[in-house]
Image (spheres, helix red, strand yellow):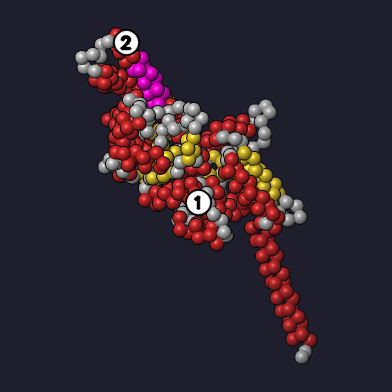
Amino acid sequence: MDITMKKCIASKRILVLILLLCMSLTACSKNGSKEYGLNPESPVTITVWHYYNGAQKTAFDNLVKEFNETTGREKGIAVEALSQGSVNNLIDMIKSSALKRVGADKMPDLFASYVDTAKELDDMGLIASFDEYFSEEELSGFVDSYINEGRFDKNKSLKIIPIVKSTEVLMINKTDWDKFCLATGESEIKLSTWEGIAEISKKYYDYSGGKAFFSRDVMANYILIGSYQLGHELFKIDNDIVSIDLNKEVMRKIWDNFYLPFVNGYYSKYGKFASDDAKTGDIIAFIGSSSGSTYFPTNVILEDEKEYPIELLVLPLPNFAGARKIAVQQGAGFVMTKSTKIKEYAGTLFLKWLTGDEKNSQFSFDTSYMPVKTNANDYDFITKILKDKNIEPEINVKKTLEVSLKQVNNYELYTSKAIKNGTQARKLLEDSLLKRAIEDKKKIEEELASIKKKGEDIKEGIVNDAESIILRYSDISFESWYKGLEKELSYLVLGH
């Protein structure tokens, strides 16, 4: 072999080595870019703020601990989670941090948030998009409506990752309900509509000697979903333009199906949560969050300190008769604060781990929340996962998840819109109708007591007087309530 040939072969070998080196460097570069500089020898710390309490906090803390000891240690990520106690307190803490108020803590890397708070902070330029860190294939595994909720800005970029979700269900003290049904011949059939709930509540009031049957948490959901169900979405967004569709006829139907049973004593509200009133026996049925089943009482404690055990019956959310089935989609997702790429990527890896089918199913059964992936959003699927791991869920959680998972697969789901002053608008809907009903009930009782004292009920009977007085109050109060609602919502949401 001559010298020229040897030089040619040597040159080719050098060229191949150079190409291989380039490919290796490119691969390393891509891998380094993919991991954004994560290094197990020098872990990056991710702070997480949430509002979980009790069993929910314990379950979340256990998952954080597991992540830190496994995937976190392997990748170089340490998650520090802190509960802020309540949703409202969490919102206050986040806003204080965002506005850099004196004494406020630094913004966390991840925090639980509803869409209205997320939008407010996004308008300040503080929120990062998840689109860079999640592939289309990864996102396709989530329930569509859960992901769409997080695409609230004009570019439809993903600003909220769902972790677990909840809806509303009808929870009943089965022990006392069974006694009532045995005595009256009633059944669960009428409990599928608001009209039926009102009818049953009146019958229970007569049967029990004047005790209320029903209560409701989150009045804002009753009004928002009721209006939407009856053909008028209260807050609409079209091309980023917000409008209000407050229909008077629909609002009157919503009013009549809550106000009238309430002032008659068929519904009531004493404690902060309806489960509190169920525990004291003041009611035997209520609408509550599916995630609240862990708070359903196991005993009723009476005023004389006597108590007796009760069972839970869970039924789907009632709807107005003849209307399509709609339920709320709720539960805060996690929002990511704009930071360094390595921190954003690390936070995203934690969320991907947390929303994996196995971990998400485990968290769901520990907390009574619903999983967010399509596969896991099935009762049989998640029970199989837990059975394989020898995990036996608490009985009330099991009952609630079975109903709520079927409900979200058969109902249309509604979620709050990202509107200006959304938190204040929801508070107005939450308080105004209930407050008016409580105030009027007291006035009606005082007026009836005055009539009875004067002996003016001898001819017609106090019942007839009560009916006419209640209807009079209802007509006057509705007009006042509706006009006030129309004015205040317009000012809050539209600015005029």
Circle nearer the N terminus (2, 1): 1
Residue 50 location in percent, x, y? 59, 40
Q: Amino acid at mark 1?
A: Pro
Q: Secondary structure at mark 1?
A: loop
Asked whether the viewer can see residue 164, the reply is no
The answer to whether residue 120 is above or below residue 474 is: below
Mark 1 sits on what residue? 371
Q: Is residue 184 above or below residue 400?
A: above
Q: Is residue 70 magenta?
A: no
| The N terminus, quarter of image | bottom right
Note whether 479 is above or below 64 in the view shown: above
Q: Residue furthest bottom?
A: 1
Q: Visible in this render: residue 182? A: yes
Q: What residue lies at 35% left-to-right and 27% top-to-bottom?
A: 210
Q: Residues within 10 Å of mark 1 (few under 14, many from 20)?
A: many
Calculate the distance from the C-alpha at mark 2 to the C-alpha at mark 1.
58 Å
Residue displayed at 72% across by 69% down? 21
Q: Which residue is mark 2?
A: 453
Q: Point out which mark residue 406 bears.
A: none
**Which label sits in the foreground, 2 or 1?**
2
Residue sitting at the far right: 3
Q: Is residue 203 left or right of residue 308?
A: left
Answer whether labels 2 and 1 touch (C-beta < 8 Å): no
Q: Quadrant of the C terminus?
A: top left
| Horizontal and vertical percent position of residue 168 | 43, 41
Region of the chain picked out in magenta, as a range? 433-446
